[in-house]
Amino acid sequence: MVLGRVIRTVLGAVFGAIFGFIVGWVVELFPRFNAALLSGLQGLTGLSGIRMAALLAAIGFIVGILAGLLSGGHRHWHQY
Protein backbone atom coordinates (compact mmCIF):
# COMPACT_ATOMS: atom_id res chain seq x y z
CA MET A 1 0.00 0.00 0.00
CA VAL A 2 2.79 2.42 0.90
CA LEU A 3 4.86 1.26 -2.06
CA GLY A 4 1.95 2.06 -4.39
CA ARG A 5 1.70 5.58 -3.00
CA VAL A 6 5.45 6.08 -3.42
CA ILE A 7 5.34 4.81 -7.00
CA ARG A 8 2.35 7.06 -7.84
CA THR A 9 4.15 10.05 -6.31
CA VAL A 10 7.41 9.41 -8.19
CA LEU A 11 5.64 8.78 -11.49
CA GLY A 12 3.48 11.86 -10.97
CA ALA A 13 6.57 13.97 -10.35
CA VAL A 14 8.41 12.63 -13.40
CA PHE A 15 5.48 12.95 -15.78
CA GLY A 16 4.57 16.36 -14.35
CA ALA A 17 8.10 17.62 -14.96
CA ILE A 18 8.13 16.22 -18.50
CA PHE A 19 4.71 17.71 -19.29
CA GLY A 20 5.72 21.08 -17.80
CA PHE A 21 8.94 21.12 -19.81
CA ILE A 22 7.09 20.37 -23.05
CA VAL A 23 4.50 23.09 -22.36
CA GLY A 24 7.29 25.54 -21.49
CA TRP A 25 9.13 24.66 -24.67
CA VAL A 26 5.98 25.30 -26.72
CA VAL A 27 5.47 28.65 -24.95
CA GLU A 28 9.06 29.60 -25.82
CA LEU A 29 8.19 29.16 -29.51
CA PHE A 30 6.12 32.35 -29.23
CA PRO A 31 8.65 35.04 -28.22
CA ARG A 32 6.24 37.91 -27.50
CA PHE A 33 3.94 35.75 -25.39
CA ASN A 34 6.93 34.30 -23.55
CA ALA A 35 8.37 37.76 -22.90
CA ALA A 36 5.01 39.01 -21.61
CA LEU A 37 4.70 36.08 -19.19
CA LEU A 38 8.27 36.49 -17.96
CA SER A 39 7.96 40.24 -17.49
CA GLY A 40 4.75 39.71 -15.53
CA LEU A 41 6.53 37.12 -13.39
CA GLN A 42 9.37 39.55 -12.80
CA GLY A 43 6.92 42.27 -11.81
CA LEU A 44 5.13 40.00 -9.33
CA THR A 45 8.03 38.13 -7.76
CA GLY A 46 11.23 39.87 -8.81
CA LEU A 47 12.53 36.73 -10.56
CA SER A 48 14.42 37.37 -13.76
CA GLY A 49 16.67 35.42 -16.10
CA ILE A 50 14.67 32.19 -15.93
CA ARG A 51 13.63 30.05 -18.88
CA MET A 52 9.94 29.28 -19.20
CA ALA A 53 10.63 25.58 -19.84
CA ALA A 54 12.58 25.29 -16.58
CA LEU A 55 9.96 27.19 -14.62
CA LEU A 56 7.06 25.09 -15.91
CA ALA A 57 9.06 21.88 -15.41
CA ALA A 58 9.55 22.81 -11.75
CA ILE A 59 5.86 23.66 -11.35
CA GLY A 60 4.90 20.40 -13.07
CA PHE A 61 7.22 18.48 -10.75
CA ILE A 62 5.59 19.96 -7.66
CA VAL A 63 2.05 19.47 -8.99
CA GLY A 64 2.93 15.88 -9.93
CA ILE A 65 4.09 15.16 -6.39
CA LEU A 66 0.93 16.65 -4.92
CA ALA A 67 -1.29 14.78 -7.40
CA GLY A 68 0.45 11.51 -6.61
CA LEU A 69 -0.01 12.00 -2.89
CA LEU A 70 -3.63 13.06 -3.19
CA SER A 71 -4.62 10.29 -5.59
CA GLY A 72 -3.23 7.65 -3.26
CA GLY A 73 -5.05 9.08 -0.28
CA HIS A 74 -8.33 9.42 -2.16
CA ARG A 75 -8.34 5.77 -3.16
CA HIS A 76 -7.45 4.72 0.39
CA TRP A 77 -10.30 6.76 1.94
CA HIS A 78 -12.95 5.07 -0.20
CA GLN A 79 -11.59 1.59 0.37
CA TYR A 80 -13.30 1.17 3.74
Image: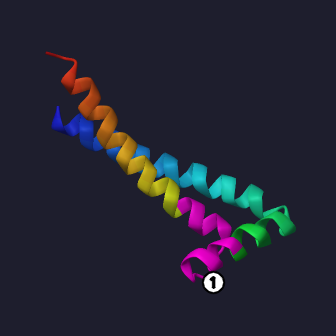
User: In the displayed structure, would residue 38 be above or below residue 69?
Assistant: below
Does the magenta stretch mainly form a helix, a strand or a loop?
Answer: helix
Q: Relative to residue 75, is residue 42 drawn left or right?
A: right
- Nearest the camera: 60 or 38? 38
Q: Which residue is mark 1?
A: 48
- Vertical comparison of 1 with 13: above or below: above
Rendered-image quadrant of the C terminus: top left
Quarter of the image that includes the N terminus: top left
Q: Residue at x 77, y 67 (%)?
A: 34
- On the picture, is 50 further left or further right than 71? right
Q: Position of residue 50 (x, y in %)?
A: 63, 78
Which residue: 33% across, 45% down?
9
> Amino acid type of disc 1?
Ser
Q: Is 8 displayed left or right of 55 in the figure?
A: left
Q: Which residues are magenta?
A: 40-57
Residue that protrudes farthest toward the front in the picture? 44
- Pointer 1: residues within 10 angstroms few (<14), some, or many (20+)? few
In the rendered image, which quarter is residue 39 located in?
A: bottom right
Q: Nearer the viewer, residue 18 or 47?
A: 47
> Is the residue 36 above or below the residue 77 in the image?
below
Q: Quadrant of residue 6?
A: top left
